[in-house]
Image: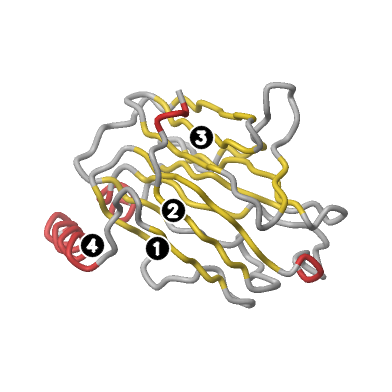
Amino acid sequence: MKKISSILILIFLLTGCKTWDWGEIFYYEILEGNHSGVNMPVIIEGTEKWGGEMTLTYNPGKMIDPVENFSYWNKLGGLMPSLDDNFIVGKHQSARAAWRVDPLDTEYIYIGYIVYVWGQDEPQRGYLLDGDGNKVRVKIRDTFFPVVTQYSDHWGVGVKYNGQLAEIRVNDEELRREKFLVVMDPYYGDNPVAPTTIYIRLEIMDTTWIY
């Protein structure tokens, strides 16, 4: 029964979801009070990379959660390698570029990563650092280039901004190359919902610059 359900979900996703092709432009709107701007948070396409040219816009005066007074890690997008293991079995494995805001610096976003390694309950999170060891800090509405790549034994997450490249590799010995990858759409936070509406533009571009 589990196998049949898995096949049905795969067929639905392959026939009912958006495509993922170079040159396509996606516009995401995460409304105030929501987590996501889409009904189905996956895109299926035979690719081993996610990323391109991105801009992110919001009201900086309303960006910080008024109760907690800090910004959670928010997901820009990324990859999940398997439908069966992530949706059916319940184990999770994925890598995403991420961002958060400093309460004292809300005109800028700080770029990071969220990676779920097979067999680990908690994800690995952190900032992406440039060649000088500084956190990558992007002014809202500026163009930057995030990328997530699946390799045979590790995830690659990186970003380009103002001529600086920052990247990290996270080992995952159980990564398998799949015919179809699940491309994850943006998602805000964990428990708190978005305190203000967030607009994201992503143009799918060649991301071979990462390595």
Q: Using the numbered discs, state the Cα–Cα distance from disc 3 to disc 1 in whole angstroms.
A: 20 Å
Q: Residue under circle 4?
A: 13
- Viewer-proximal residue, 47 or 72? 47
Left or right: 169, with 195 as reference point: left
Between marks 2 and 1 in the image, the one whose residue lies nearer the viewer: 2
Q: Residue at x 40, y 49 (%)?
A: 204
Q: From this viewpoint, which residue is outermost toward the right?
A: 104
Please name the amino acid that badge 3 sits on.
Val
Residue 23 position, x and y percent, is 35, 51
Left or right: 39, with 162 as reference point: left
Residue 203 position, x and y percent, is 44, 53
Residue 132 position, x and y percent, is 74, 22
Q: Are marks 2 and 3 in contact (CB under 8 Å)?
A: no
- Viewer-proximal residue, 206 or 16? 206
In this picture, is 196 found above or below 132?
A: below
Between marks 4 and 3 in the image, the one whose residue lies nearer the viewer: 3
In this picture, is 58 found above or below 114?
A: below
Q: Residue under circle 1?
A: 41
- Label 1 crowd bin: few (<14), some (14–19), many (20+), radius 10 Å: some
Q: Residue under circle 2?
A: 203
Q: Are marks 4 and 3 in contact (CB under 8 Å)?
A: no
Please name the amino acid that badge 4 sits on.
Leu
